[in-house]
């Protein structure tokens, strides 16, 4: 069976669960998404791109952006970042504050909101514009010059962002933010509100499958840095469901509450699945089902 047939079958496998679960509504601008929408894209390191369903329809990438902020912060600024954020799974929800006090303002990992805020702060210090750094990287890697942030989604999140504001201020109280809280949050909301399709994201994530090489052949990360980011994605990329995701899908992956999941098959390619209805951990039910079916049928897994 060729790869396109495998994608078609993965979508069929996911169909029964599409629309089950809840669309994220704590960001009101996301609540209008169609819970039954679905797309799945595959990009290979050899340059093949395939897709099925609404794989070219843009959606809000939300926390998938954290994979790019982390990669860019490490590429530009190196390992010093790890003095400000840990690398352990949190076992807590993505927006939790509970570990911040006992761990003295050092978030558990770069993918929970607390850790991502620190990474955005670092990237902002390193580049002068965290939002533009992420957007320009996504444009270059996806080849989509129109890719941009949705200001309505960013404003909606800012307006209802009491939790993120609370955790950012709490981190700042420990001296673990270099820029003003308001600036860091604005850039964080803006990169979360980037809008991209499964196709765009599969292409933009390929540098992790290529062991650190960008689309133009230049090196963003060393092979060992790419390995390490993939490891943190596997253990922390889907929050307190990372064990379940590893069990079912067997790949490093990053989810977002817009319903997307970007997964990396090192040395082979990337998959991006999208379905807005989420499980209680904030991961797309349809996307996990499709990735589970694809990796089970093809054996494309790190295990
Ligand atoms: N922007 C969202 C938030 O901060 C991202 C959460 C997510 O996608 N898990 O709550």
Image: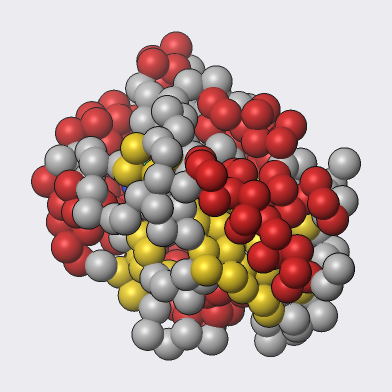
140 relative position to 79: left or right: left
Q: Report whether residue 40 is seen.
A: yes
Q: Where does the image place residue 224, in percent across and percent down from the top left?
A: 81, 54
Seen from the viewer's position, the closer of residues 65 and 186 is: 65
At which x and y percent is residue 94? 43, 32
Image point (67%, 27%), residue name: 243
Q: Quadrant of the C terminus?
A: top right
Quarter that holds the N terminus? bottom right
Percent of width and height locating residue 128: 36, 67
Residue 159: image x %, image y %? 12, 46
Q: Is residue 209 above or below residue 275?
A: below
Residue occupying image coordinates x 65% and y 36%: 245
Which of the 4 image quadrants contains residue 42? bottom right
- Residue 23's image quarter? top left
Work out which residue is located at the far left of the displayed protein and give it: 159
Q: Report ligand 1 position as a quadrant.
A: top left
| Residue for point 23% across, 38% down | 26
- Left or right for 211, reference 264: right
Kindly tell me whether residue 228 is visible in this rendering.
no
Q: Is residue 262 left or right of residue 30?
A: right
- Farthest top residue in view: 102
Q: Residue at x 59, y 44 (%)?
A: 288
């Amino acid at each position: 069976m060729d790869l396109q047939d495998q994608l078609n079958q993965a979508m069929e496998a996911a169909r029964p669960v599409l629309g089950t679960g809840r669309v994220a509504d704590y960001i009101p601008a996301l609540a209008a998404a169609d819970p039954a929408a679905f797309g799945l894209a595959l990009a290979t390191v050899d340059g093949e791109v395939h897709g099925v369903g609404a794989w070219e329809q843009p959606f809000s990438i939300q926390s998938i952006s954290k994979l790019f902020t982390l990669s860019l912060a490490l590429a530009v600024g190196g390992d010093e970042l790890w003095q400000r954020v840990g690398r352990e799974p949190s076992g807590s929800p993505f927006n939790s504050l509970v570990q911040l006090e006992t761990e003295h303002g050092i978030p558990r990992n770069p993918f929970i909101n607390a850790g991502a805020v620190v990474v955005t702060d670092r990237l902002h210090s390193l580049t002068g514009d965290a939002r533009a750094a992420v957007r320009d990287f996504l444009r270059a890697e996806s080849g989509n010059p129109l890719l941009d942030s949705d200001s309505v989604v960013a404003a909606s999140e800012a307006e209802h962002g009491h939790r993120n504001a609370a955790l950012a201020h709490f981190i700042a109280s420990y001296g673990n933010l270099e820029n003003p809280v308001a600036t860091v949050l604005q850039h964080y909301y803006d990169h979360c509100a980037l809008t991209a399709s499964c196709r765009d994201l599969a292409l933009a994530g390929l540098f992790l499958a290529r062991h650190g090489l960008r689309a133009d052949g230049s090196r963003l990360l060393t092979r060992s840095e790419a390995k390490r980011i993939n490891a943190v994605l596997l253990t922390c990329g889907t929050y307190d469901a990372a064990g379940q995701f590893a069990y079912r899908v067997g790949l490093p992956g990053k989810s977002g509450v817009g319903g997307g999941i970007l997964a990396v098959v090192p040395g082979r390619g990337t998959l991006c699945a999208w379905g807005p209805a989420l499980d209680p951990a904030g991961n797309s039910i349809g996307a996990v089902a499709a990735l589970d079916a694809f990796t089970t049928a093809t054996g494309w897994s790190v295990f």
